Image: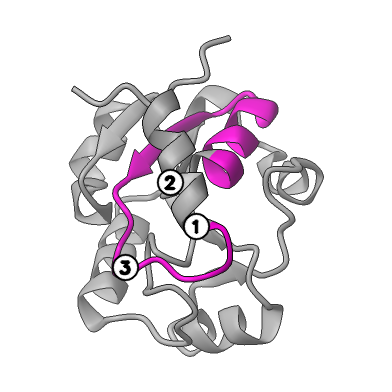
Amino acid sequence: MSMQPDFLLKNVEEVTPAFLKLNNVRLLIFDADATLILAQSDSILPERVTLVEEIRKSGVRVMVASNGKTTRIEKAFGEHKIEAHGYSLKPLPFRLKKHLKGYDKKEVLLVGDQFFTDILCAKLLRIRCAMVEPYGPDQGRGMKLRRWFEKKIIKRK
C-alpha cells in the first residue's frame, strides 16, 4: 500500500462535481480546519457552502470529519445543514468507519490538508484520499514540525 495521497490538489475548489463523477465518488469526506475552513474557525465562507451544495446536487453525499471540538464544528456547518462530525480522532479509523456502510471503498474520497491525520486515516480505512495545500495560516502546537515531515514524505510534482 502506497502512503502517497491518491490526488494532490491545490485546494477544495478543485473537488468539483465533474472531478467526483470522473472518479466515481459517491461519498466525499472533507476535513474541516485548514481544508474547508480556516484553522480554529467556527464559520465557513459562502463560496465553500455553494461548493458543498453543488456537490450534493450532483448526487454525492458530503460529510465533514474534524478532530476539532464538536461544538465548534457543529456551529461552523450546522446552520448550512452540512453533515459534520467533530472529535473524529483521525488518524484512528474507527469513528469514520461507521459512515462508510453502504459504500464500496472505491466510491469514497477523503480530502484533507494533513498527512499524519487525514491521509493516514484514509490509508487505514483503505479509501482514496486527496491532499490539499493548507487553507490559511497554520495553527496549533507542532504544526511547523509536522509540515516539515510531510514535505519529506509527500512527493509533489
| Residue 15, horizontal then vertical, whole percent | 26, 47
Give, as a three-letter code, the residue at label 1: Met
Magenta stretch: includes residue 91: no
Q: Which mark is residue 147?
A: 2
Nearest to the observer: residue 7 or residue 15: 7
Viewer can see residue 29: no
Write down the residue under mark 3. Answer: 53
Left or right of 10 on screen, residue 5: right
Q: Is residue 7 above or below residue 93?
A: above
Q: Which mark is residue 22?
A: none
Give, as a three-letter code, the residue at label 3: Glu
| Residue 21, horizontal then vertical, whole percent | 28, 34
Circles 1, 2 touching at the beta carbon (< 8 Å): yes
Closer to viewer: mark 1 or mark 3: 1
Question: Which secondary structure, mark 2?
Answer: helix
Q: Which residues are magenta?
A: 116-142
Viewer can see residue 52: yes
Q: Is residue 97 above or below residue 137?
A: above
Name the residue rendered at 32%, 46% in the picture: 132
Left or right of 127 on screen, residue 91: right
Closer to viewer: mark 2 or mark 3: 2
Left or right of 105 on screen, residue 157: left
Question: Which secondary structure, mark 1?
Answer: helix
